[in-house]
Amino acid sequence: MINVFAKAGLALALSVCTLGAATAPASAQDVQLRIGPDGVRPVIRDRDRDYDRRDRRMGCSPGEARAAARDEGFRQTEIVRATRRSITVQGMTRRGPDRITFANRPGCPEI
């Protein structure tokens, strides 16, 4: 009977240790160690502030639009029209001159 209790206690201890080890790395992702003149100090990041900063970014920059057009197979790209809502890029494809329009939003989605 003591053998059964010992095995159950060992199984319980192993499961508690495993559960504790699984959650420790998830909570450590918000902690950053900075090394500076005052030594090593932990800094807790505010993830909500990081997301807000990214959301406030205006839209698709002309450089991002040209890079997205190159990813679509355009060469010799140039911006021909940029409005508040869209950015139009002109360039050469395998079939000849062509245009592509991107939404002026983060990530430059194609319209």
Image (cartoon, grey):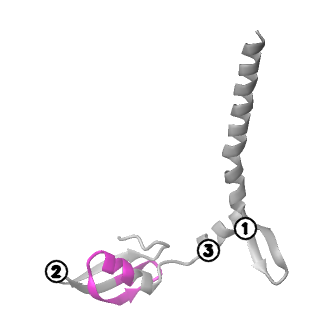
Amino acid on which disc 3 is placed: Arg
Mark 2 neighbour class, 10 Å CA radius: few under 14, some 14 to 19, many 20 or more = few
Residue numbers of the magenta segment = 66-88
Q: Earlier in the sequence, mark 3 or mark 2?
A: 3
Q: Which residue carries the number 1 mark?
A: 32
- Residue at the image point whose x is 47% and y is 79% from the top: 60
Check the image and report above or below for 28 versus 65. above
Q: Earlier in the sequence, mark 1 or mark 2?
A: 1
* Picture quadrant of residue 9: top right
Q: Earlier in the sequence, mark 1 or mark 3?
A: 1
Q: CA distance from mark 1 to mark 3?
A: 24 Å
Tell me the tag on residue 56.
3
- Residue at the image point whose x is 43% and y is 81% from the top: 64
Q: CA distance from mark 1 to mark 2?
A: 48 Å
SS for dot 2: loop
Tell me the tag on residue 9.
none
* Picture quadrant of residue 71: bottom left
Residue occupying the far right of the picture: 38
Q: Position of residue 37 (x, y in %)?
A: 82, 84
